[in-house]
Image: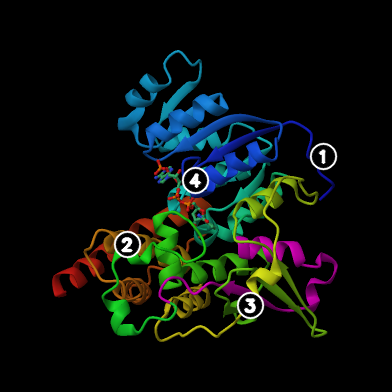
Amino acid sequence: MGLVDVTTPRKVVVLGSTGSIGVSTLDLFAQAQLDVEILALTAGRNVEKLAEQARRWRPRIAVIADPALLGDLRQRLAGSGIETAAGPDAVVEAAAMGADWVMSAIVGAAGLAPTLAAARTGAVIALANKESLVCAGPDLLAIARAAGGSVIPVDSEHSAIFQVLQRDCLDRVARLILTASGGPFRTWTLEAMAQATPAQAVAHPNWSMGAKISVDSATMMNKGLEMIEASYLFSTPQERIDVVIHPQSVIHSLVEYTDGSTLAQLGPPDMRSPISCAYSWPERLDWPAQRLDLAAYAQLTFEAPDHDRFPSIGIAREALRLGGGAPAAMNAANEVAVAAFLDHQIGFLDIAGAVAGTLERMNSLGDLATTGGDALDNALMTDVSARRIAAEVVGQVHRRN
Ligand code: NDP
């Protein structure tokens, strides 16, 4: 990849602009005074925030995924000259407007179709939406490559690996080591975790994130999803990807080489830093980022994950071993189970049980094989059947509780 002139004006699209990553992205644009022309901002349902962002950032179009909210959005942007649109197809069209750089920050499998559409245009994709890689990683990467674009990870762990990976000696990489904060229940007993409430699960100790990824951090399914993401992004089998708990979230991940040398990337826990990297790579932006004060931390600590209390990493390894549609099915089942937990239908420990149960049932029915053909169709078909089975599993757990 050649050097990027970070002062050159760029056309950008921010998918999921109203979420935690979307807001950090727009904040980075302001902090780093980037010369960006925003083609589109998109949101799911938060029409008020989308309209406020649109008035501030003047995109060509503001898109709301929920079609029922189009009238409201139009009213809020009346007289602004900003176009409006609604519905999932309009989000996909926004992704394919021909931007130089697309932030993919929709949460969940809903981000897959827009991310694939952006990949087909040859844009640089800053990928926060890890679920799209989990659902269709190899296809997404191949489509981006074929179109002359690239996928740059925004997840802090993958951004770290991306930054310390020596591309001229990939065959000398021994292990990728993903760090994990351990989430809010790192020190809780299984008995206490069984009683954990949604409010406790979304209260992450280090990062301020959307509700779904916060619950994923608490179950450590986030690390499972990230393992699959890393396996696809860096063409590394799961046997050579390890997870270490590092509660301070200062070391964002590491690459161990065959000569025993291990390279790490460090920084304060602020998502604007990996977003900045994804915007300027292989250049660097100069903006008033918070700097790391190692002495203020005094201690950086590490521990092995406890797989009895946090079975999700093992479930993700199994999904990678099964291959085919298993990662997409795991992701869909997890989305259903997390939503049921946030809705007080099932307990915290039931989330991993529901995901494992869905995978088992689909595997025994032979539903995890992929048929070749279109990446999006395959992933969506698996997604739909996994959601149906996961809803049944969740319903059984709910009735039993
Ligand atoms: P949020 O829940 O804060 O934001 C999600 C965004 O997606 C919002 O703009 C939301 O709109 C939009 N959205 C939700 N549902 C749909 C839909 N069906 N169609 C279109 N848009 C939709 O999530 P985060 O910002 O925390 O996370 C976004 C992605 O980034 C996730 O994949 C997450 O795993 C990943 N990520 C997040 C990190 C973080 O620090 N937050 C770190 C690393 C990765 P609305 O506001 O209207 O609901």
Instruction: Please report the residue visible at 84 percent of the width from the left and 46 percent of the height from the top.
Output: 3
Query: Foreground: 98 or 221?
Result: 221
Q: Is residue 324 visible?
A: no
Residue underneath mark 1: 5
Alpha carbon distance from label 3 to label 2? 28 Å
Q: In this view, does 273 lie above or below 364?
A: above
Mark 4 surroundings within 10 Å by alpha-carbon count, few (fewer than 14), some (14 through 19), many (20 or more):
many
Q: Which mark is residue 300?
A: 3
Q: What are the residue bounds of the magenta stretch?
A: 156-185
Q: Would residue 319 appear left or right of 176 to someone viewing this image?
A: left
Q: Residue flagged by tag 4: what amino acid is it? A: Ala
Distance between the Cα atoms at labels 4 and 1? 30 Å
Residue type, numbered disc 1: Asp
Read off the residue under disc 4.
113
Pick the front one: 148 or 72: 72
Residue at left offset 15%, top offset 75%: 400
**Which residue is label 2 attached to?**
199
